[in-house]
Structure formats: C-alpha cells, structure tokens
Image (cartoon, rainbow, N blue to C red):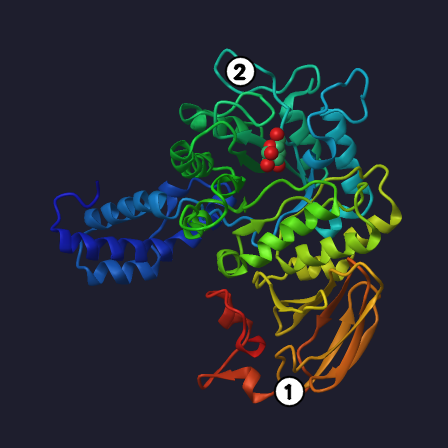
Amino acid sequence: MCLEGLEPASRGVYYIVLKAVWSLEKSRFVDLRSRKEPVFLHLPLSSSFQKLSESLAVNFRMRLAVVVCALALSAATFALDNGLMRTPPMGWLAWERFRCDIDCEHDPKNCISENLFIDMADRLSEDGWRELGYVYINIDDCWSSMDRDKQGRLQADPKRFPGGIPKLSRYLHDRGLKLGIYGDMGTHTCGGYPGTTLDKIELDAQTFADWEVDMFKFDGCYSNATEQEQGYPRMSKALNATGRPIGYSCSWPAYQGGLPPKVNYTQLGEICNLWRNYGDIQDSWDSIMNIANWFFENQDVLVPAAGPGRWNDPDMLVIGDFGLSMDQSRAQMALWAIMAAPLFMSNDLRTISSGARAILQNKMAISINQDPMGVQGRRIVKEKSGIEVFLRPLSKNASALVFFSRRNDMPYRYQTSLSKLNYTTGSYKIYDVFTEKTTALKDSTDFVVSVNPTGVVMWYVSAPAKLSLRQFYAGGKLRGPADYRHDNAIPPSFL
Ligand code: GLA
C-alpha cells in the first residue's frame, strides 16, 4: 500500500530503505514496548533515521509517511521481534506427566485443575527451581470448557478452574513466575477441546493477553497445511498486536515433517520464539533416542535455524518420571543442553527423587543450556563402537563436550584427545559437569573417559590458557564470541 504509485524499480529501493530504517528503529520499538509505553505516538526520530531521511531530502510530512510505512512493513516482515526468550525458556509443562486427566473427583491431586498448577508453582518457587531459571508454569491441553462463552471467547473449565486463568496468572506473577497456555490452530485441540479457527485468532490472542498470559503454545491438530500457513503467522501478529510480551511456541513444523522444503526455518525464526519440529516425547529411553536421532541426523538443517529468541524444541524433559535410569536422565539433560533446547520439565515436583532433582538442578548443565551466544551444538563424532561425541561452542571461547554411549554391555573406556576433536593448540581447563571435578588437559594429550551404557560424560571446556594465533585470528582480525553472534556459525577453531 505504501509503495503504490512508485515505479517498480524505485519501489524496490524504497522498500530496502524502509527496511533499513525500520531495522534501525525496531530495537527501540521493542524496548519501549516492554516498558509498556504508547510506542507509536511518542517515537522520536533517532539520529540514524534523521541522517537517512535528510539524505533523501524529504520534508517532515514525507518523513512521517516513511515512519508509518516502515512500521506497516515491519508488521509484515518482522512479525515476531518481541525481544523474548533470548536464551531457551525453562519451566514446567503439564502434558507428558499429567496428560488429559480431568477426573478431579477421583484423582484430585493429579487432574488438570488450578490446584495442580498452584502446587507446581509452589514447588518452583520454594524448592530452588525459580532461581535456576525454571520460571514458566505451562498449562497444556484439556484446560478449557467445551464451549466458548457468549462473546465467543475461550473460557477455562469452571469446575476445575473456579478462579479462571486470571487467578492463576496473578498467583504466578506474585511469585516471580510466568504462565503459559495452550491452544490449537484448527477446529479442535488434539484432546478434542475447542480450537482456534482462522476467524478466532485475534479474539483468542486478545483473551490470553487480557488474562496476562506470558507464553502460548499453538498446536496444529485438526487443520490442513493451507490453514496452518495462514494461521501461524497471523497468530504471531495478533499476539504482538496485543502489546503484551507473549512467548510464542509453534507446533507447525511438527505437522509438516520438520524439514524443508515444507518447513521454512527462516520464516519460523521471524514469527515464533520456539517450535516443535518432531513427534511427542514419551516417558521412555526409546522415545529419547528416537528424538535425539532425528535432531542430530538433521543437524545441518536445524543448527542454523536456532539462535537467541528462536529455538528448536525437541519436547519436554521426562527426568524424574518413571522411564529413565539415572544415567539416561543425565543423558537427556546433557543432550538437551547441547541442543540449546527449551527446558520444560514434565514431572511431579511434589514427589521428585533427590537424584532426578540434582540432575535437573545441575548449575553447569543449565548454564551450558543457557549460554548467551545461543549456538546450537552438533554431533561431531560417531564411532562404530557406539560412542558419540557432541560439541557446543559457548561464549568466552569455551565449549561443552558430551561423550555418549549407545552400548548396553558395560562402561566403555573411550580414548581420544582434544586435538583429535579439532581443538587448537593449548592447555585447557576441564570441568566435569556431573562429577564436578576439574582437570587440566593439553590438546595433544590422549585421555580416556569411561562412559556408562546409555549414559554420558559431560565437560565444560574453558578457553586454553595459552592462546593460539590460529584460534583467535582469522582473516587478519581478532575473533571472539561477538563474531559468531550474527551468523550462528561454529567457531573455526572447532571445525
Ligand atoms: C499434541 C502435542 C503435545 C500435547 C498434546 C495435547 O500431541 O504435540 O505436546 O500438547 O497434543 O493434546
């Protein structure tokens, strides 16, 4: 609309200029919005903008038009620059452990009701979880009434949520926690509750904002590919338009096979903060392996898609449930940290064992997962013996290594060296994430790690004490984490 009446060639130039103007202005827009100020009316012209517009020799009215056009275009091209989830979100999610148990009469402690979420919020805030970053409490399917209200809005089941969703969000916010909720792009949710058809998108987004919800998972049952193609971007815009920061989790790619050409990861990064790429996790080692296999087999597609504010989601942590041994629990924690995965536990925090809690509360595993550079790690070695090695580049020129065993006989003594794993010359400090022991290691020294069956050894590797020129200088310029921030590439020192 803004470019109507221009020659096609000048349209292209104007479009590029407008996009450039907007990209200079949008960070200010996001900051302002998170401070809840009326943005569009008070936005002063920044010096960057002034220079650009002066060089275009336009008068004030023209400049105003440019701002309006830039903002309008931004809605189409930068739909989800909401500044949220710069590191993978962490919290608790009801689905895997509590499913669609709505029998509050016979199973009051475990049914999907406000009591369950209040119990979990109490545990997050009183048992040390919140301080470690686990701040989201996410409602999943089966929370709503079977009918919309008279104004057509979704409403919580009145028996199971007598205080409605606003009561829950207040309860959580009072404790420094955040609330997530679930909906479905389609006629029904996967559990058969009312879905969000295309005509209901804006209404439902506004309802969640009115309830002061902080995150929204948009599932995709009962819709076709065309509806999803329209619905997921539209929900992104609708959430943004409410003015409330709401993290947006899209199940879209999982319904389209998770891979290009059906899935466009560039677009997903622009409209969603995280996305489910693959099938549902279950409480079993088979399920963990099935998911991990798919994510690492497709790492060339998935790794570049991830970064601050945009994450691949291999689904919940099932540590603390019934299906995993302690070794397998450490393996899930380690692999999810390497993958920069969202860490949503789905377990019963009221009865969790101290062993499972120690794994989920491991500070170094969490800080690796939460590394601010936001580069997703990769599998770098796959041995015939069943040993695999994973590496994630971290800020401060550090890295995380995971040695994983697919074997089922006995602990395997795997021998290698840092230089065999493509580390450059130097002496590195190694911190073992689960034994908490520290050692020093030269790149050239062979070492042995003993990896339990279906278990891991996980290391945080500090930058070498002696810096090698090869590591820090590339193309004649000093390299550091900042150089990797934009292209999301593996630092050359690790290639
Ligand atoms: C789908 C999703 C799950 C869960 C259920 C709820 O299967 O992938 O994560 O939300 O629906 O019905």
Task: Residue 129: give x, y in percent of width and height.
Answer: 77, 47
Between 24 and 47, the one lying in front of the other is 24
Ligand 1 lies in which image quarter?
top right
Task: Residue 268: give x, y in percent of width and height.
Answer: 45, 47
Task: Residue 350: give x, y in percent of width and height.
Answer: 84, 37
Residue 361 appears in the figure: no
Label 1 C-beta lies within 8 Å of the nearest ligand 1 atom: no
Q: Residue at x 65, y 49 (%)?
A: 290
Label 1 sits on a secondary structure element that is loop
Quadrant in the picture for the N terminus: top left
Between 197 and 48, the one lying in front of the other is 197
Q: Could you tell me the amino acid type at mark 1?
A: Thr
Q: Could you tell me the amino acid type at mark 2?
A: Arg
Front label number (2 vs 1): 1
Instruction: State the mark number for residue 323.
Output: none
Instruction: State the mark number for residue 425.
Output: 1
Q: As displayed, is residue 161 above or below residue 73?
A: above
Q: Which of marks 2 and 1 is nearer the N terminus?
A: 2
Task: Residue 375: give x, y in percent of width and height.
Answer: 56, 62
Which residue in the structure is indicated by mark 2? 148
Numbered marks: total: 2
Between 312 and 453, the one lying in front of the other is 453
